[in-house]
Amino acid sequence: MKNEPWKSGPKELLRHGLEHLSFETDFDYRMGMIAIDNSVELMMKTYLGLPKRITKLEGVTSKIYNEATKSFPSLIDTMDKFAKDKLVGIVLGEIEWYHRIRNQLYHDGNGITVEKEKVIAYASIAKILFENLFGEKVEIEGKKYGIDDFFLVWADFNKLVVNQGPKIFSKMNLKELFNLSDSEEYVLSGITEFRKKLVHNPDEVDDDDLNLNVNELNKFIKLVKQKQK
């Protein structure tokens, strides 16, 4: 199935969850988990509610559908009974387990966190389920950055330099300061040259270059932090 309007809601929720996951903060992991679970629930409700001519499901009457949508466990049971062939690669017990985590986050959210690994795992299940039900892979599109985004990330990099304290004055260059390999120094040199271009000739910078360098700088900051551990 391609470009069908009924799948836009579940797809939007799933993408929203995946976008939160990409920001890598405790808040975004929580919000990502909630959005992903909401998308899973909406996927199943949407699919079971489609006309028989589309799904080829036998026996899903209006009464059965209404009962199924009253609770998450009922929804899971109905999928297991009527759409088992759409659950290849899916373990419904795992979905129920992740749904309970989502409920804890939603109802007792203050101070509760969820591990990144759990959100990634649930996201993987959700993407498989969406593809099984609607015949389409879901991935987030590349985030588009503005000039301000680059300078915000550059400010984070400068903090890493300043935080070196007296070491700044005892090292000859950033390669020595951060113990960089030749290839890592080359990447940083490219980012630095891009910054100069952005400052002096911003009109010559295209969106692809901007996105590339913001992503590269974010990766470089993570690399430096790992070296400092």
Image (tube, rainbow, N blue to C red):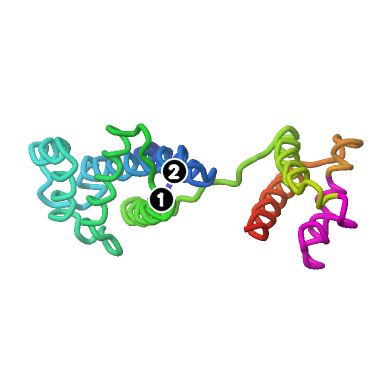
Indicate left or right for 172 with 138 as reference: right
- Mark 1 packing: few (<14 Cα in 10 Å), some, or many (20+)? few
In the picture as drawn, the residue positioned furthest to the bottom comes out as: 182
| Residue 9 position by quadrant | top left
C-alpha distance separating marks 2 and 1: 7 Å
Q: Residue 36 location, x and y as percent?
A: 37, 44
Is residue 29 part of the magenta span, yes or no?
no
Instruction: Report the disc number at residue 115.
Output: 1
| Residue 150 position by quadrant | top right
User: Is residue 3 visible to the viewer in this orientation of the structure?
Assistant: yes
Front residue (pair 141, 2): 141
Indicate left or right for 198 with 108 as reference: right
Instruction: Give the residues in magenta.
Output: 169-194
Quadrant in the picture for the C terminus: bottom right
Q: Residue 26 location, x and y as percent?
A: 46, 41
Compared to residue 152, the image places residue 74 above or below, namely below
The residue type indicated by label 1 comes to: Glu
| Residue 83 position by quadrant | bottom left
Front residue (pair 40, 167): 167
Instruction: Report the disc number at residue 29.
Output: 2
Residue depicted at x 73% and y 46%: 160
The residue type indicated by label 2 comes to: Tyr
Marks 2,1: beta carbons within 8 A:
yes
Give the secondary structure at mark 1: loop
Residue depicted at x 38% and y 56%: 121
Q: Main secondary structure of the magenta part?
A: helix
User: Is residue 208 visible to the viewer in this orientation of the structure?
Assistant: no
Q: Residue 139 location, x and y as percent?
A: 49, 50
Name which of mark 2 and mark 1 comes first in the sequence.
2
